[in-house]
Image (spheres, helix red, strand yellow):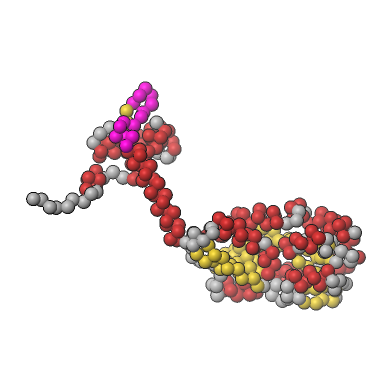
């Protein structure tokens, strides 16, 4: 008695047809036309017919019959259509599994942001994580100098900050405007004035951010360029402390418009209508050159670059405010009167 166990796939192997032929076959069965299949798959019509002919030779029976100008699958062809759809579903399942394994659905990402970005980054992460619930994102909030140091140490997957310095082996892409404005308590005399010159403002006491802050750096560069110097300033190392100090009447401050959502809504702060302001900075997504991204990190990067501007504008009190800060100046003054 012959007890040899034959492999179950023996016949398939002998037939030797390819995934490509099955894909073409499925398309012809679906469209009912060699020409339309060729157009859909960017091939020539003879290339499609040739592949189908080879498949028929392999299987040993015709797969299509002509009914008028249209072609329909034969009985064997109809069976093969079911088989093809089954294979295509299994391939999709395998691709999902691959995504899982590569970490699109699981994984831990480390993102560093400068302190001013803490006002919008959590909204971005909330939206991203709602699409990728298995991904954990750790957010480190610190100032610009500290973020640059972390990037040099290759600690975070990516960072959100103002424009990074050149020559630091970093890749950066801007994704959203970051307008810097001068704020005052609503009852401050400058809060009601139009087109205030910088020479007038520098006479006031300013509460400014700590050295190493991008906001401070941008303001100092502006002062230098305009040949002005602050006559009286105090340092505070957080935007929140600066806003509260300004509300308390300690002086004026310079902050990003992104930090002001609540205070503008409640009329607790006003924006000074300073000539040449707002300072138009940009937010950048930054990572080290040659950084190898996981699938999840790549997905987060793409999400921030394409979606951040929409997500963040939806969180501002008035979308027109972000587009035209000057309007906001007048609105917030009126609401405080
Ligand atoms: P900062 O950075 O929070 O350190 O001031 C903001 C920026 O770089 O624009």
- Look at the image and say whether residue 68 sits in the magenta stretch: yes
- Is residue 202 something one can see in this rendering? no
Residue lying at 76% horizontally and 76% vertically, measured from the top left: 236
Q: Vertical placement of 281 versus 202: above or below?
A: above
Is residue 290 shown above or below 20? below
Expressed as whole percent of the image width and height from the top left, the position of residue 127 reads 61, 57
In which quarter of the view is residue 145 placed?
A: bottom right
Which of the 4 image quadrants contains residue 315? bottom right
Which residue corresponds to the image point at 87% horizontal and 64% vertical from the top-left? Answer: 186
Q: Which residues are magenta?
A: 66-79
At which x and y percent is residue 94? 40, 53
Q: Quadrant of the C terminus?
A: bottom right
Residue beneath the point at 61% across and 60% down: 126
Can residue 215 be found in the magenta stretch?
A: no
Q: Is residue 326 left or right of residue 44?
A: right
Furthest residue toward top: 68
Residue 93, horizontal then vertical, whole percent = 41, 51
In the picture shown, does residue 314 fall above or below 12? below
Front residue (pair 47, 324): 324
């Amino acid at each position: 008695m012959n007890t040899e166990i034959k492999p179950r796939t023996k016949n398939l192997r002998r037939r030797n047809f390819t995934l490509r032929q099955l894909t073409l076959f499925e398309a012809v069965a679906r469209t009912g036309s060699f020409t339309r299949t060729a157009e859909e798959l960017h091939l020539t019509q003879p290339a499609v017919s040739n592949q189908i002919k080879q498949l028929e030779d392999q299987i040993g029976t015709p797969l299509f019959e002509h009914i008028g100008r249209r072609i329909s699958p034969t009985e064997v062809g109809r069976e093969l259509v079911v088989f093809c759809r089954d294979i295509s579903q299994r391939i999709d399942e395998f691709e999902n599994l691959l995504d899982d394994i590569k970490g699109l659905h699981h994984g831990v990402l480390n993102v560093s942001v400068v302190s001013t970005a803490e006002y919008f980054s959590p909204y971005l992460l909330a939206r991203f994580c709602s699409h990728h619930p298995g991904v954990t994102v750790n957010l480190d909030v610190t100032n610009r100098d500290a973020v640059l140091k972390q990037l040099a140490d290759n600690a975070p997957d990516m960072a959100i900050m103002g424009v990074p310095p050149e020559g630091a082996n970093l890749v950066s892409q801007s994704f959203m405007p970051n307008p810097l404005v001068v704020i005052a308590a609503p009852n401050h005399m400058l809060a009601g004035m139009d087109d205030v010159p910088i020479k007038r403002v520098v006479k006031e006491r300013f509460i400014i951010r700590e050295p190493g802050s991008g906001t401070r750096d941008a303001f100092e560069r502006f002062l230098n360029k305009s040949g002005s110097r602050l006559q009286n300033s105090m340092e505070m190392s957080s935007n929140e402390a600066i806003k509260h100090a300004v509300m308390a009447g300690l002086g004026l401050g310079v902050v990003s418009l992104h930090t002001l959502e609540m205070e503008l809504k409640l009329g607790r702060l006003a924006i000074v209508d300073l000539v040449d302001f707002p300072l138009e900075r940009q937010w950048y997504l930054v990572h080290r050159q040659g950084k190898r991204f996981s699938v999840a990190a790549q997905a987060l990067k793409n999400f921030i670059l394409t979606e951040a501007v929409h997500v963040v504008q939806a969180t501002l009190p008035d979308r027109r405010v972000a587009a035209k800060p000057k309007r906001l100046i007048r609105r917030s003054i009126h609401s405080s009167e």
